[in-house]
Each structure stands twice: as structure tokens, then as C-alpha cells.
Image (tube, coloured by chain):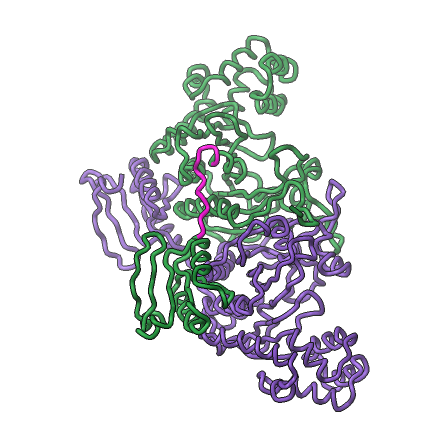
Chain colours: A green, B purple
Amino acid sequence: MATSAFQRLPGFRDFPPEELALRSHIQEAWRRVSRRYGFQEYDGPPLEPLELYVEKSGAEIVGQLYNFTDKGEREVALRPEMTPSLARILGDRSRGMSKPIRWFSTPQLFRYERQQRGRLREHFQWNVDIVGEEDVAADAEVLAVAIDGLRELGLGPDDFRARVSDRRLLREVLLAVGVEEERLPTAFGIIDKLERMPRDKARATLLKDAKLGSAETDGLLELLDSAGLDAVRARFGDRGAVAAELARLAQYLGALEAMGLGAFVQFDLRIVRGLAYYTGIVFELFDRKGALRAICGGGRYDRLLELVGGEPLPAVGFGMGDVVLGELLAERGLLPAYERALDYFVVAVSPEQRAQALRIAHTLRDRGSSVAYALKAELGVTKQLKAADREGAKEVLIVGPDELARGCVVAKNMESGGEREIALSELT
Amino acid sequence: MATSAFQRLPGFRDFPPEELALRSHIQEAWRRVSRRYGFQEYDGPPLEPLELYVEKSGAEIVGQLYNFTDKGEREVALRPEMTPSLARILGDRSRGMSKPIRWFSTPQLFRYERQQRGRLREHFQWNVDIVGEEDVAADAEVLAVAIDGLRELGLGPDDFRARVSDRRLLREVLLAVGVEEERLPTAFGIIDKLERMPRDKARATLLKDAKLGSAETDGLLELLDSAGLDAVRARFGDRGAVAAELARLAQYLGALEAMGLGAFVQFDLRIVRGLAYYTGIVFELFDRKGALRAICGGGRYDRLLELVGGEPLPAVGFGMGDVVLGELLAERGLLPAYERALDYFVVAVSPEQRAQALRIAHTLRDRGSSVAYALKAELGVTKQLKAADREGAKEVLIVGPDELARGCVVAKNMESGGEREIALSELT
């Protein structure tokens, strides 16, 4: 088979109808759930000033971007994430808006990643953010949206789990264990990588870089391994700063429990989510088999809007991509089969009925039905019926000389084969 | 008012919720109409190999593109139009597909245009194409889609008009007038610019560049000015080549008439649509006041797929942008007012009812209703009611100690003020 002289760029996807239907299946579920939670949809430009990303993530981000100099000598980049655009947009208008602001978006994002099997350079990402509310209820609400987004697509507690932590709690625990204030970023960095590190190496790194004693390191590792808040409470619950953080987390978990989502949520002190940016509760959603990368990540980021020059506003949100999620849905057999569907296919028995067939088709379309007919005028009835079948028509309307003489058309149900007559007066 | 330290790029739009709602209003109308006509939605990457556009439009297109060299040394460009991507995608797969192929898309497109008032560097464009059908019925079907797209948004025959022509007819008319074969592209170019040119200049250019005689030029200009096919038929209808083209156009106009769309369509031999690319019937949609640029343009392009290396397939389609259309809708008062809407706002009278309120909210969300509540736990009832009003809640559900003791909540209609009790058992 000859192929086109032009290939699409590596890491990009085409969306022919059957692929677009899957993308819409996911995006429409995201939209429905967002609206149920009272979120409003927004969007920004796919191209932004490069400095917007450098300001948030540092100069090292540039190596992963599609960036270039435009014809007006501006340094620009295809958006690698949505939050900087959100912060920029709100920076200009949040002061006039009532709080909290509940916004969502489903933008396409771009990263120049090294080519790897299954790694793409673009994806669609559901972004959900509450801006202007520091109450832990906002954190719970945002995680509930993420969980319900997956539930809406047919996934249940056997399929995925949200692992949650709080960077403020981790900080207090680390201080309690004996990590010095200036070693905290180092310790955060080690814990962030803990699950991808052999235990020996984790231990050695904590001893050397976080300057912890041997017993303290073992105690910390044990605590990080234990699920649930109880172990933390048992060891450090008498320290005021830890107790305050535990109380907030308990309120957070209680809210999710009240919403009936407790089965999806699991406390895990090892969830850190990178080094900068997040300031409080953080979470990631994983498939329970653990075979895939995280489906979703988010948390509280109370200083970002200020950073890009806007009003200082607390914020919490998440991003969920369509690629890993699509893999999970495919694996669970939860992707819908693609079917063409049409309400009517109008068949003109001979070219003399053509004008009448067009009239009927357009009348039905004006009423909101989906209608097609054979464009080639000289096509025989058998071929027209085959085309109707191929396009998934529910009913075929046969417009022939005998029927027209009787003032009607024959409607044939393509599934049952049953026929009925419809008066022309109803169709024009 | 302080503004963000970062500005969006010139020529790009942000879409805060009220703007996104207008964009969705237009795009959803486009989708509904496409589906009524049995078209399937597709999409391609916003970034493509630069050569894809150079191949179709020549090297001079590069000056109008957002193009750059990516980190893998590939010459790439943000898509300025959708048809090359369509041709590329079909080039790989059309051989296995039943014809005709009816596809539509609503991509965002990008051009580095010189900054002018009201000229943007991005827009969303409805693309509708029928590929693999040379019958003139496909041309009529595609124009009907474009017309119905505008009708769906509330525009009628007083608001806009489709001006149609056929480049094959124009060719035969020019040959009949006496233009030599090798002067045809020049003559097409002059006629394409006719409406933006003083009459003297048009006349002089036709005399000089198209090498027409004085009487022939006057005759041609008179013909171009006359609306309707009759003038052409009267003058050249006895020439076989012209008559064949007139017959085809009559069939085209007859099909649109049968669909009840005749009032929207006007023959106009001056519609050429550029120099290359199109091969047959061409059309443009204009507002009837003539104050705006064309709303939509399209036509038959039977050689493009072959050009990018695919199967030789006839094709016909159009592109309609959201910017000019949005201006026309705004001018006619046809843009919907933006209103926030929510089915329920749940009010907890005191923090003790919080968990119950969350339970109720989530139950209603699970049933598909849109629900919000105040995230700040200590907010008084009056402030919660204000928030409900701000978010456009239809009903407020009041969850208080007395109500819960009676096993119910009070539902207050925000418009009528009427109240009713709902049993808790119905809400959890």
C-alpha cells in the first residue's frame, strides 16, 4: 500500500473518527463531572511567552519545551501545562471576581520529551482548580472531582486509588525525626524518589545527605512504609505542630468519607510531588495493579498566583492526562466500541424522486435528525441500501414513484426489517 | 489595578468562562449540524511538518506561519489550515475506506499575520469535507451544511448570502470571450481582485495583461456584473462547453432549491477564490450588509490528495472561522447572555450538619445534578444563600438540625421563593 509522502511528527497523534470518539468519550466525561461540581470551563492560548514557564519551573524546563523565537522576536513556547496560563489569566481579573473561583479546562499540552515507546509529545489534560479558598474542604472537593471523573468512565475502587499526603505534615514529621531545617528540601527530594530507589540506597542517602542518624533513618523509613495516619499519630501525635496537621488531614479524609469516596483514598506520607510549587495536601491517582504511571496528580499551591504577579490567593487543583487513562480504560475493557449512527437514510428509487428525497432529508435535518442519502444520483436501490447499512442508519426512507403517488414514503427499520408508511405531509 | 507580570501574546485570545461559553455556542452548533448531515468528527496535530504547507501553497506561505526548527532538527509549523492535515491523514488510510468520506473538524489554526486592529493570529475553523465523490450533489451538500451552520445560530436570508461560481464555467466563458489559454491564470487573478479594484483599473488590466480587445473587455465586465446564469446562457449557451457547465450548475442550484435553501444562494461569476487549489464550484458566504470579511469559503479541490501523495480522490469542502462569525452574531444580537447555573446549592445551617450536607451533595451529583456548597465551614446561612444566588442555583437545600430531626431537608426555590420538604431517604 502506498502511503502519503508526508508523515505526522513523532509523538503526535492523528484522530480519525474512531480515535476522536474515544478522546471525546473521555473529555465529555470530564466535562459532565466538572459541571456537576459547579465548575466553569475556560481555555487559554496554546502558545505563551516562554518566561511564563521559566518563572514557575526554572530555566531547566526549557530543554523539555517546544520553544522558539517568533517573527516578532518574542521567545514563545507551546504550553507544557495549564496552571501558568490559569495564573496569568486570573492575575489580570481575579480581583473583580467572587471567591472561590472554580474553573476547569481540557487543553492539549506539549512537551519535547525524548522519544520513548508509548511516550507522546502531546496529550489532553483535564485541569480542575479552586482558587481563593484555603479551607481543607476545597482540597477534598478537588480530589472528589478527580475520583468522580474516573468513576464516570466506569472505574471503581478495585481499579484505582488516590494516595494522599500533606507536605506540611511531612515537614513537621521530618523536623520531629531530627532533620535540620536547611536539610528539609534534600529530605523531601529523597522521599519523592523513595519508591524508585532500592532500600539500601534510600537509607544511605538519608544518612549522608539528610544528615540523619542511623536509628532516626530506620524510624523514618518505617513510618513512611506504614499506611494510615495512626502510625504518625502514635509516634508524634503529642507534638503540637504534628497534631495540628493530623487534625487537618483527618478533616480532609472525613469529608471524602462523607461523600462516599473513602474507599478510594489512602494516606501515604511518601507522596511529595516534586520539589517546589506545592504547599500543602498533595495527591496522586494510581491504577491498583501499579502497572501504569500516575493517572493524575495535584494538590495545594498557595503561592503561584503571587509569583506570576497576581493577587495572593490560595489555590488547589489537579491535572489528569488522557493517555495513561486511555491505557487503563482499554485494559479494563471500558472503551466504547465505535459505531456509525444515523437516524435516516433517504433512498430515491430513481433520479426522478431525487428532488423530493432532498426535500425530505432537509426537513428531517431541520427537525434535528441525522440524515444522509447517496450523493451519486444514478446509484441503484440495492447500492443505496448498502450505503445506508454502512453508515449505521436506523431507518431507511424509500421515496419511489408508487409511494409518492399514494402521498407517502415507506420507512424500513434496518434492524427489525419492519416497514411502515409515513405521509408526505409529515415530512415536508 | 495591578496586572499580571505576564501578558498573553498579541493576536491570541484568552477564554475565561463567559468567552468560552460563546466559543462553545458556535462550535456546538457546528457539531450539531455536521452530525445531522452524517459527518464524522476528526482532528489532527496542531504541529505539522513545514513542508506539508509549502507543498500545497508554495514557499511564500512560510512568511505567514508560526514555523520553527524543533529540538530534533525538524522544520515544523503550527497548522495555518486543516486541509493539508486531512489530505495527509487520508493519504494513509483512504484506500481502505468506503466512499464518500464525510468528515468534519473544528481545529484552532494559527497565522503570523501583521498586527492589525481586529486581526487575530489564531482562530477556530469549522472544516467540512466530502472526499471521494465527484457528483455535483456533493458540492450542494457541502454548501447546505455551511448555510445550515449559520441558520442554526439564528441567521436567516436577510443576514447572509452564499455567492457561488464554478471555475470550469469561468474558464469556458473566458475562452469564449477570447482570452488565450495561457492568459487564463492571469485573467483568473484579475477577476479574483475585481471587487477590490476601481473599474478603470480593472478594464486597463484586462486589456493589458489578459490581452483582451476593448469590446471583449467591456462585454466580459458586463457579464461579470450580471447576477444569475441567464446572462451567461443568453450569450454563450449555444457553445457546448459552456452549456455543459451551465447544466451542472443548474443541477447544483436545483438541489439547494429542493432543500429549501434557494433564498440563500446567488450565482456570481466573480467568485474565484485565489489562484490554485480549487478546481470546480467555489463559494463564499457574506453578510448581506457587506461590512465584514467573508464568513466562509470553500469549493471543489479534486487534485489535493494526489498532491500530498495519497490516492487520487475528488474532494469538496469549506472552512468557516469563529471570529468574523462571532462579530456578525454580536451585531445581530444573537449571542446568548452568559449565566451561571446550578441545580442545587446545599446549605449547612451549622458545621454539625456539614457531613450530612456533603453526603446529600454527592448523592445528587451521582444522579447527574450540578451541586455546590460553601467550602468555608464557618460561613453563616445568609452568606451561603448569597453564594447560592451568585452561582445561579435553582434550588437551595437547607440542611439544619430541626429538619434533620424530622428526617428531611427544606428545598427553597430561588426564583419563586417557594419551599418544599424532601425526605432524607430520597437524598442519600
Residue toward you, B113 or B371: B113
- The quarter holding residue B242 reads bottom right
Whole-percent x, y for residue B124 in the image = 58, 58
In this view, the residue farthest toward the left is B406
In the depicted structure, whether residue A58 falls above or below residue B410: above
In the depicted structure, whether residue A6 falls above or below residue A56: below
In the depicted structure, whether residue A392 falls above or below residue A312: below
Residue toward you, A330 or A325: A330
Q: How many marks?
A: 0
> In the shown orientation, is residue A82 left or right of residue A372?
right
Whole-percent x, y for residue B225 in the image = 64, 85
Residue toward you, B299 or A112: B299
In the depicted structure, whether residue A388 falls above or below residue A305: below
Main SS class of the magenta portion in the image: loop
> In the shown orientation, is residue A41 left or right of residue B2?
left
Q: Residue at x 42, y 40 (%)?
A: A153
Residue toward you, B232 or A115: B232
Q: Is residue B417 visible?
A: yes
Examine the structure image and report whether residue B267 is included in the region drawn in magenta.
no
> In the shown orientation, is residue B45 left or right of residue A138?
right
In this view, the residue farthest toward the bottom is B215
Whole-percent x, y for residue B411 in the image = 25, 49
In this view, the residue farthest toward the top is A215
Q: Is residue A181 visible?
A: no
The magenta-colored residue range is: A330-340
Whole-percent x, y for residue A318 in the image = 51, 38
Image quadrant holding the C terminus of chain A, namely bottom left
Examine the structure image and report whether residue A338 is included in the region drawn in magenta.
yes
Q: Residue at x 68, y 38 (%)?
A: A64
Q: Residue at x 60, y 32 (%)?
A: A276
